[in-house]
Image (cartoon, rainbow, N blue to C red):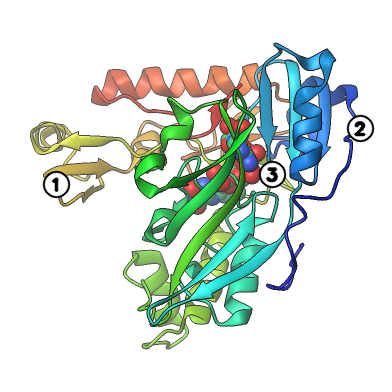
């Protein structure tokens, strides 16, 4: 785990030329453990090396893929362009006012390392997001969330390199258009920006979020009635470790499908046939359906198509049992989508980015 102290400076200005390698296996860089190769590949540790890699004559006009931890990626083919492994590091306390601390973390920082570092400094607000794999730079891409909190609740702004202009731009939350596992970076801004750093505004008097059922149960099991942010983090880590497969042991990208959001009328119609359907009100008249419950009820838990399988402890997670290709995982995902469409007339949208 990489963890800088807050007064480490960002190394944006250090000059350096990245080594552009050719035909590099991406297997070590995606948590599904899928074999696919990059035509060109470079590790970027600062803005100068990022710009240098993008400016290379050999990669002009070719598609670009930024990889952080590769924990939200489904590689379905060899990548014909330039893959950049984001490795810019640094965590910095920018300042504070009466209400909050402003903390900037570089895109290549490990997310969980950043959360642990924050807790160690007494900075609160990120504890529910403990143990999410990947990097800080990818957190805004799908507005990561877990156990009742999404990163936009403490997001202030981010800095990104606009590829077309070569300019570093700043974006606030409105510009990022955060939504449930979604942002502008999955749509209009896809492939147009490289996120360099993210600044969070961490409240000084953070009230903890302990309402999520699994979290409540874990805290209760330890007799904790008035949890601190550290208690929340410990409980989240314990629950996640029990429920989710470790990518180091079995390839996966966490939840493979988003929970679909439907109207109240649609929910009522479904409940006629499925009275036990698990759903959560969204506060706007709509309801989020538990995709894992639907997949489980449809009999998919533990089923495999070749080396691609539905995790036997959590139906929302697809796993690579060994030698699955991206196409194998995609075929399993499509079979599940088709079955859920037929049974529930609901469309399941994948959460990872498909390449
Ligand atoms: C076991 C497990 C559990 C998980 N649990 C959760 C969870 O609870 N909640 C949740 O929200 N997610 C979860 N995830 C998904 C994943 O961890 C997050 O989406 C994470 O933010 C991905 O980070 P990454 O660095 O691995 O991104 P990558 O997979 O490397 O990239 C994902 C996308 O972001 C783009 N990208 C990455 N970095 C940059 C950058 N600097 N600039 C521009 N684009 C960039 C990539 O091009 C790609 O499109 C889980 C995954 C696993 C394997």
- Which corner quadrant of the image does residue 291 belong to? top left
The quadrant of the image that shows the N terminus is: bottom right
Q: Is mark 3 within 8 Å of ligand 1?
A: yes
Q: Which residue is mark 2?
A: 19
> Closer to the N terminus: mark 2 or mark 1?
2
Mark 1 closeness class: few <14, some 14–19, many ≥20 residues within 10 Å: few
Camera-side residue: 196 or 123?
Answer: 196
Percent of width and height locating residue 164: 60, 23
Ligand 1 image position (quadrant): top right
Camera-side residue: 108 or 281?
Answer: 108
Camera-side residue: 263 or 324?
Answer: 263
Residue at (39% x, 34% y) in the render? 295
The quadrant of the image that shows the C terminus is: top right
Q: Which residue is mark 3?
A: 69
- Residue 71 visible within the image: no
Percent of width and height locating residue 200: 49, 62
Which numbered disc covers residue 151? none
Distance in Å between CA atoms under marks 1 and 3: 34 Å
Left or right: 128 as drawn, with respect to 86 = left
Distance in Å between CA atoms under marks 3 and 2: 20 Å
């Amino acid at each position: 785990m990489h963890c800088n102290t807050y007064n480490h400076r960002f190394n944006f200005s250090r000059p350096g030329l990245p080594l552009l390698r050719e035909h590099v296996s991406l297997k070590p860089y995606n948590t599904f453990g899928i074999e696919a190769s990059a035509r060109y590949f470079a590790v970027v540790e600062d803005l100068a090396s990022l710009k240098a890699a993008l400016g290379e004559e050999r990669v002009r006009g070719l598609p670009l893929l930024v990889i952080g931890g590769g924990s939200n990626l489904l590689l379905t083919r060899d990548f014909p362009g330039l893959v950049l492994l984001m490795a810019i590091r640094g965590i910095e306390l920018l300042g504070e006012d009466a209400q909050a601390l402003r903390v900037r973390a570089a895109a290549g920082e490990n997310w969980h390392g950043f959360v642990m570092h924050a807790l160690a400094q007494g900075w609160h607000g990120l504890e529910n997001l403990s143990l999410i794999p990947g990097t800080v730079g990818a957190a805004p891409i799908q507005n990561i969330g877990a156990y009742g909190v999404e990163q936009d609740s403490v997001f202030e702004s981010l800095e990104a390199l606009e590829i077309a202009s070569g300019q570093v731009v700043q974006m606030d939350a409105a510009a990022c258009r955060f939504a449930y596992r979604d942002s502008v970076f999955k749509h209009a801004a896809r492939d147009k920006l490289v996120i360099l750093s993210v600044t969070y505004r961490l409240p000084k008097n953070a009230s903890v979020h302990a309402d999520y059922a699994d979290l409540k149960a874990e805290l209760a099991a330890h007799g904790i009635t008035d949890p601190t942010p550290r208690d929340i983090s410990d409980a989240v880590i314990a629950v996640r470790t029990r429920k989710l497969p470790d990518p180091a042991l079995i390839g996966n990208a966490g939840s493979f499908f988003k929970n679909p959001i439907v109207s109240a009328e649609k929910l009522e119609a479904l409940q006629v046939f499925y009275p036990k359907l698990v759903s959560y009100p969204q506060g706007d008249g709509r309801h989020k359906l538990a995709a894992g419950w639907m997949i489980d009820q449809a009999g998919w838990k533990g089923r495999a198509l070749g080396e691609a399988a539905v995790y036997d402890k959590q139906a929302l997670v697809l796993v690579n049992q060994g030698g699955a290709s991206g196409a194998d995982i995609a075929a399993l995902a499509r079979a599940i989508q088709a079955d859920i469409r037929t049974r529930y007339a609901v469309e399941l949208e994948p959460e990872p980015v498909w390449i």
